[in-house]
Image (tube, coloured by chain):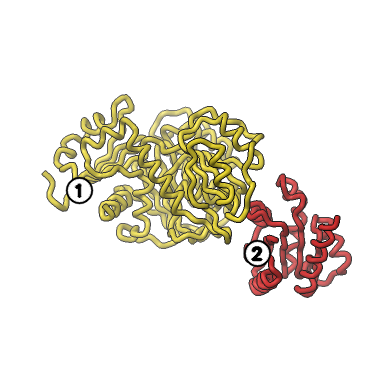
Amino acid sequence: MSQDNEKLLIDVGSTYFKLSTPDSIEQHFRDFNKDILDDLLQKSGSTIERFNKDDVHICSSANGGLSTLIIGLTNSFSLKYATNIAFNSGINIIDTLLYQNIAEYSVPGDLIDVVIIVGGIDSHSNIFGQDLYNYLEQLNYSNIVFVGSEKDANSVAANIDNLAVLPNVIDNRLHIVEEHLKEYLTNLYQQDIMGKEDIKNLYQITSNQIFSTPYVVNQALPHIDASYSVVNPFILLDIGGATTDIHYSKDLVDDNIVTENEFDRLVFKKLGVYKSKQSLIYAAQNNEFTYELLTHLKVTENIFDEQSDKATKVLMQLAIFLVLCKISHYRKAYINLKLLAINSIIITGGITKVLSVEEIENIIAFFYRKILTSDHKPVTILDSNYDIWTLGAKEIKHVD
Amino acid sequence: MKVVTGVVGNDIHVVANRLMELSLNARGYEVFNLGVNTHLEEFFDAVVETGANILLISSLNGEAEGWSREVKALKSKYKNLDDLIMMIGGNLAVGRGDAEEIERKYKNYGFDLVCHQIDLNTGLDWLEEFIEKRKTQ
């Protein structure tokens, strides 16, 4: 059995399991025909048996997270603030809807895990009306929360069943107020993880709370220099099987969001290299620089149809390029980062097992030359031993 | 009444911006100051979030000229801003310019009140006169 200082850290991703002990890191491709626990025990049973339940810490992003629809008044304030809070709460799937155009939006057919209604400072009133209630009547959702104007809260609550009402996310100086919505969403996410049958079974091997992986990574960022010589400001790209997470220093954003967080998170939900492979290829085909990049890599478009190690490498290189495009001024996204100010780019996730530093630097240099017409060269750091995740998991352990 | 104000575009004249806020406060307005380097969309979005009645844009280095051409097109995307009082003030031209010509141009861009190189208090008097006049209409 384990010694006091020995802990087993497990990350259950959409594509891989990772296990970290004081002496080793194991990684296994998941068998999607099996229950997560069965698969884990079959592949790493001997490692898991060495540890007490108290010494096993698990995080997971495998359930895909909560799906969220945010209905807000403006792109610069209510929608932006709520989106920022949702990303930082570990949520991956976020759609936004501008309230003034609500009648023009089609109603999603899928079940939405949580709807967030936001908008207006507390002294503003009569913002939301019948068109909101008509839309919600057609929408299929599990939870709904109001974080808009205090003056409107009662009338909105009177028209929507089971509405949770929290303090406004916009204060009277138009600044963001994070804590209440963040706590609500984090708890909901936690309940969601614990409610999934596959994840529930994992409590057979741990007596600790199972956290979401983005939350764990975020905990590591302020301490990242313990593992690497990272020069601030930096971005961390976690390119996984289903999604791509970006964690970035707040210094990289000229923005009206002023919080105490040093780091924010952003997710591209359809930019992964396994589960989201088709949407990644679709995004690539719609980027005017892709063909030039393929030529640069000495391959043709036919590589998209191939099943080979070379094809996987190219796909991962494309993922890096597309993510950088999406956070640059080349593509107007929810947020644009000052990419010329970046000193370090840290790459983590399954991608580190496939690409070398040189192959990644090649793509980053291509991006800076073509999109930003610059020779800027941030230092590339490959987190190939999952040190960042291990660091984050240890931080959570300390909090416990 | 609620006023959204700030300095448009890549303009960092923070002192004038602060003086504007103080003067508006002294006259009893509820002021939402977006500060310097503010993009046009943020001004309109702030009006929507606060329910402001007045948008007062300032510019001191001629920066407003380029941005103001977008005002009508951008404002038309918002559904409930027809009654918004649009005011702009400061140094609205690059180099020398004919004041009457500048005023005509900015009114054409969609502003109700244009204060090119006008003293702050005079400009705010014009605003009050405009509000009174609108009440009687």
Image colour assigned to chain B? red
**Dot in front, 2 or 1:** 2
Looking at the picture, which amino acid does disc 2 mark?
A: Val
| Frontmost residue, A352 versus A233 | A233
Residue drawn where x is 37% and y is 56% of the image? A221
Residue drawn where x is 12% and y is 49% of the image? A3
- The quarter holding residue A129 reads top right
The reply to whether residue B13 is in sight is no
Residue drawn where x is 37% and y is 59% of the image? A222
Q: Position of residue A188 (x, y in %)?
A: 40, 41
Chain to which mark 1 belongs: A
Q: Residues within 10 Å of mark 2 (few under 14, many from 20)?
A: many
Number of numbered tags placed on the structure image? 2
Disc 1 secondary structure class: loop
- The quarter holding residue A122 reads bottom right
Q: Position of residue A151 (x, y in %)?
A: 58, 51
Q: In the shown orientation, is residue A202 left or right of residue A63? A: left
Q: Residues within 10 Å of mark 1 (few under 14, many from 20)?
A: many
Looking at the picture, which amino acid does disc 1 mark?
A: Lys
- B89 w.r.t. A244: above or below: below
Give the labeled residue for mark 1. A7
| Frontmost residue, A124 versus A69 | A124
Farthest residue toward the top?
A33
Image colour assigned to chain A? yellow
Q: In the shown orientation, is residue A386 left or right of residue A312? A: left
Q: Position of residue A239 (x, y in %)?
A: 42, 43
Residue drawn where x is 83% and y is 72% of the image? B96
- A100 w.r.t. A378: above or below: above
Label pair 2/1, CB-CB below 8 angstroms: no
The reply to whether residue B93 is in sight is yes
| Frontmost residue, B134 versus B81 | B134
Give the labeled residue for mark 2. B31
